Image (spheres, helix red, strand yellow):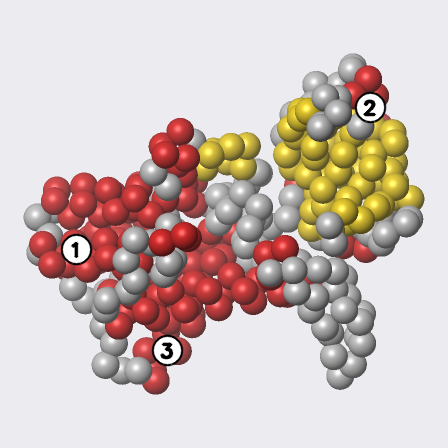
């Protein structure tokens, strides 16, 4: 079976894959078609079923395991599979859905333990209590939630992986810039994307089916600010602590067009933004380079402003 990260333009592929997302759409010519995200553990690729009669006997839904034969084309610099044949897997195929889920490289239990250890380093009782309370509230969903629907860390356990990596970077930054407040920085890293659990609907496989109504109307930044207010008020935390944590969440996207009406106005907020950007960029760049051989360039990556990444010979 051909892995997704080995697909090449012009080749015919055949194998077992998971439909990470399925959408029935209408073309400009008013024809119905299925828009797919085809995935395995190595990655994902867009797919199209132009003839909907092909799947008239299949209940097309997110998370479905299928056997596909198709032609790999290119559209706007990205690979795309034109599905020619498709069927649901059956017991005789002896395939497991776990084999098709892109997941974080560490276990959820291991990453949660790491995050808890950083949270317990926080000296300020109010900051620590807010952080641990919100971790407790989201503990179970954190084990499988991705950090995004399609962007960086959109894998099972991706949110934990993103937070863990940022905490490790924060620890190193604090060694260099020892005038920073470690309590604020560690809490900001842990909390900055935690409300994505409310922003998106994801199943136990880490597959996001849709954004929630509140997620669409408010977004995870506003939802996170509300959570800090709720918990901080309940435990009677110092008002400035509540506002500083809220400001870090509010400003971590840096620009209004990306959801932040304020830029960081405290040192820890500035560092939080760049830690977030570094981890997102490194993840996306590494993902783009996975199928690339030494001395060659990747396909254009939309998440990297349509850049092509180069893998050096040595």
Mark sitting earlier along the chain (1/3): 3
Element type at marker 2?
loop
Q: Would you name the residue on which mark 1 appears?
A: 243
Q: CA distance from mark 1 to mark 2?
A: 54 Å
Q: Quadrant of the C terminus?
A: bottom right
Q: CA distance from mark 2 to mark 3?
A: 54 Å
Front one among 141 and 300? 300
Element type at marker 3?
helix
Residue 251 left/right relative to 2? left
Element type at marker 1?
helix
**Going 47% across and 58% down the picture, which residue do you hit?**
162
From the image, state whether disc 2 or disc 3 is nearer to you.
2
Q: CA distance from mark 1 to mark 3?
A: 23 Å
Q: Would you name the residue on which mark 3 appears?
A: 173
x and y, in percent, of residue 147 in the image: 48, 49
Front one among 55 and 305? 305
Q: Would you name the residue on which mark 2 appears?
A: 51
x and y, in percent, of residue 219 in the image: 37, 41
Q: Residues within 10 Å of mark 2 (few under 14, many from 20)?
A: some
């Amino acid at each position: 079976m051909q892995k997704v990260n080995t697909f090449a333009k012009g080749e015919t592929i055949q194998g077992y894959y998971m439909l990470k997302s399925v959408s029935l759409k209408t073309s400009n010519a008013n024809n119905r078609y299925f828009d797919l995200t085809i995935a395995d553990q190595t990655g994902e690729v867009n797919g199209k079923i132009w003839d909907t009669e092909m799947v008239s006997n299949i209940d097309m839904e997110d998370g479905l395991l299928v056997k596909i034969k198709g032609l790999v084309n290119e559209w706007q610099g990205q690979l795309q599979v034109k599905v020619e044949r498709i069927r649901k897997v059956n017991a005789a195929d002896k395939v497991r859905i776990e084999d098709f889920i892109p997941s974080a490289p560490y276990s959820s239990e291991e990453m949660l333990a790491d995050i808890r250890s950083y949270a317990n380093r926080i000296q300020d009782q109010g900051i620590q209590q807010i952080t641990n309370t919100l971790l407790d509230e989201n503990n179970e969903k954190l084990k499988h939630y991705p950090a995004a629907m399609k962007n960086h860390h959109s894998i099972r356990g991706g949110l934990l992986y993103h937070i863990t990596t940022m905490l490790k970077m924060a620890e190193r930054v604090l060694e260099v810039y020892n005038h920073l407040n470690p309590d604020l920085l560690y809490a900001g890293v842990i909390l900055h994307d935690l409300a994505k659990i409310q922003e998106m609907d994801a199943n136990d496989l880490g597959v996001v089916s849709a954004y929630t109504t509140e997620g669409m109307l408010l977004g995870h930044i506003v939802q996170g600010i509300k959570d800090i207010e709720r918990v901080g008020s309940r435990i009677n935390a110092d008002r400035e602590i509540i506002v500083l944590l809220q400001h870090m969440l509010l400003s971590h996207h840096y620009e209004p067009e990306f959801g932040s009406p304020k830029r960081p106005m405290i040192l820890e907020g500035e560092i939080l933004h760049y830690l977030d950007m570094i981890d997102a960029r490194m993840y996306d760049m590494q993902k783009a380079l996975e199928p690339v051989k030494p001395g060659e360039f990747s396909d254009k990556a939309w998440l990297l402003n349509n850049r092509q990444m180069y893998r050096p010979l040595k």
